[in-house]
Image: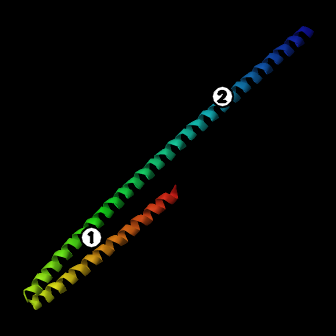
Amino acid sequence: MTKNLEKLEADFKRIKEYQEKVFKERQKAREAEAELKAREQKRELELLMKQQQDMQKAQQETLQKMQQQHKEQMEKLKQQEAERRAQEEKKIQDLKFTLLEEQAKAEKERNEREHANMMEMIMALQRQQADMNKQMMELMKRK
């Protein structure tokens, strides 16, 4: 009977050791799975952050291009206005020299109206530029 008891104790000890081994292996597997999941989440987060940065960079580049185009358009409009105004002034001088005072006066008034309209357009474009600058600053602050 002692042999049976010793055998049972030895079997019990082996079973207990086996259970501990299985428990440790399961624990290792859970830890490995948790680590793998954490790495995958980190990779996904890094990917999302890169996508967000790329999108923000693309938006910033687009806004900069729009600002450059707006600046070029403003310069072109100002140049055209200066040329038109110079031509109108020349017409006015020509009319004065030919003693056509009434036509010169009407031409000058028309020129001033056109100048006022052009200045309104320029002011509107400048407001638009200010809005775009504000958007650019907001985008830069998000970084």
Identified at 73% across, 26% down, the residue is 24
Q: How many marks?
A: 2
- Quadrant of residue 22 within the rendered picture: top right
Residue ID for mark 2: 29
In the figure, is residue 91 to the left or right of 45?
left
Report the amino acid beneath label 1. Answer: Lys
Residue closer to the observer: 24 or 126: 126
Q: Is residue 138 above or below residue 86?
A: above
Task: Indicate the position of residue 101 as horizontal and vertical percent values.
Answer: 11, 91
Furthest-right residue in this view: 2
Residue ID for mark 1: 78
Residue closer to the observer: 96 or 140: 96
In the figure, is residue 88 to the left or right of 142?
left
Identified at 38% across, 58% down, the residue is 63
Furthest-bottom residue in this view: 102
Front position among marks 1 and 2? 1
Give the crowd class for mark 1: few <14, some 14-19, many >=20 residues within 10 Å. Answer: some
Give how far apart the Cα atoms at labels 1 and 2 are: 73 Å
Furthest-front residue in this view: 97
Q: Quick one: label 1 or label 2, which is nearer the N terminus?
A: 2
Q: Is residue 83 above or below residue 18?
A: below
- Which colour style is shown? rainbow
Q: Is residue 15 above or below residue 53?
A: above
In the figure, is residue 7 to the left or right of 29?
right
Identified at 92% across, 10% down, the residue is 2
